Amino acid sequence: MRLIHDSAAVSPMTQITPQNTALKLDGKALSQTIEQALSQRVAALIAKTGRTPILATILVGDDGASATYVRMKGNACKRVGMDSLRIELPQTTTTEELLAKINELNANPDVHGILLQHPVPAQIDERACFDAIALEKDVDGVTCLGFGRMSMGEAAYGSATPQGIMTLLQANGIELAGKHAVVVGRSAILGKPMAMMLLGANATVTICHSRTANLPELVKQADIVVGAVGKAELIRKEWIKPGAVVVDAGFHPREGGGVGDIELQGMEAIASAYTPVPGGVGPMTITTLIRQTVEAAEKSCQG
């Protein structure tokens, strides 16, 4: 499995101790370190080519949460010296109109990455639009072709959230080979690619979901648990095996903050390592998207 890796951005391996306080996998701190390295790469690219890397973001409709996510990605571009091309289309946009816009961006040599913000309005064939994105610009890892190549160990950009999780685990010295990983969730851009990446890192992988029978018993067997099911605190802390590594890829807004897919309160006394919510997986998703856009820009100038 080819994982996009920035050696300058990864901290030294952290040894997990047998004490009762778990290692917090701080995605926010790691993302800031990675962004510093990306800023240097962007500056070098601009100096060499006179061109600034550009991520094009497409927002269809008026979903407030989606608009916030797109804005956060644009801000991340600015922090590393990139440009973002923000395209907003109305709620009434058709599949054909969206495909035309994607094809226009595919043909634009100044655009190095394309992000179609999920979800799109119901009348649009989202999968057809995802798959219209050119492979070399699929920096969010959403195309069937990209998924297939990644699963086969060929060159492709990994889906941003699971790729960010892999970077976070590697940066903290989490051993994956030979471990039993349970991924709770099967979405095309999170659960399924997460399972393939863990398998590629020589973990033994079980994929579960909200309809899995005996879910608590399966989670209890896991050395590594990934919550990616999209249901608030579906996975209870009493299901977690002592010493397991717990990765929560969910976020559900609540008054005073938010929660993930896993009940994290008290997790520091159970797990050997865990991702906080917020501040764990979320920042790594955006940083991975930006990093893969920088790599696409570097590749484009190599001819």
Image (spheres, rainbow, N blue to C red):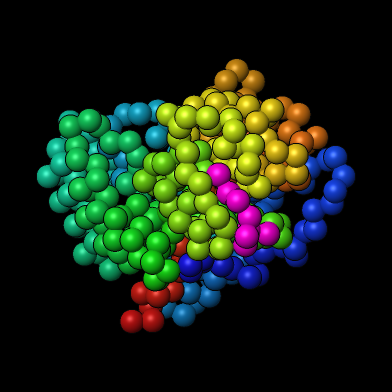
Image quadrant containing the C terminus: bottom left
In the rendered image of this protein, does residue 143 appear above or below residue 270?
below
Q: In the image, is residue 93 above or below residue 169?
A: above
In the rendered view, tell whether residue 234 sits above or below residue 110: above
Whether the magenta-drawn stretch holds residue 74 is answered as no
Quarter location, residue 87: top left
- Residue ranking furthest to the left: 96
Residue 42: x percent and y percent? 51, 68
**Does any portion of residue 273 appear in the rendered image?**
yes
In the displayed orientation, state which residue is furthest to the right: 19
Between residue 215 and residue 31, name the one nearer to us: 215
Q: Residue furthest top?
A: 255
Magenta segment range? 175-182
Residue 256 is drawn in which quadrant? Answer: top right
Viewer-closest of 243 and 127? 243
Asked if residue 251 lies left or right of residue 111, the reply is right
The answer to if 176 sits in the magenta stretch is yes
Write the residue at 58% across / 49% down: 181
**273 or 105: nearer the eye?**
273
Q: Residue at x 63, y 70 (%)?
A: 7
- Seen from the viewer's position, the closer of residues 189 and 85 is 189
Q: Measured from the top left, where is residue 283 in percent x and y?
A: 58, 46
Q: Main secondary structure of the magenta part?
A: loop
Answer whether residue 52 is visible to the viewer in this image. Answer: no
| Residue 25: percent from left, percent from top | 70, 47
Residue at x 31% of width, y 29% of height: 62
Percent across and percent down for residue 244 are 70, 44
Residue name at image x 32 percent, y 40 percent: 59
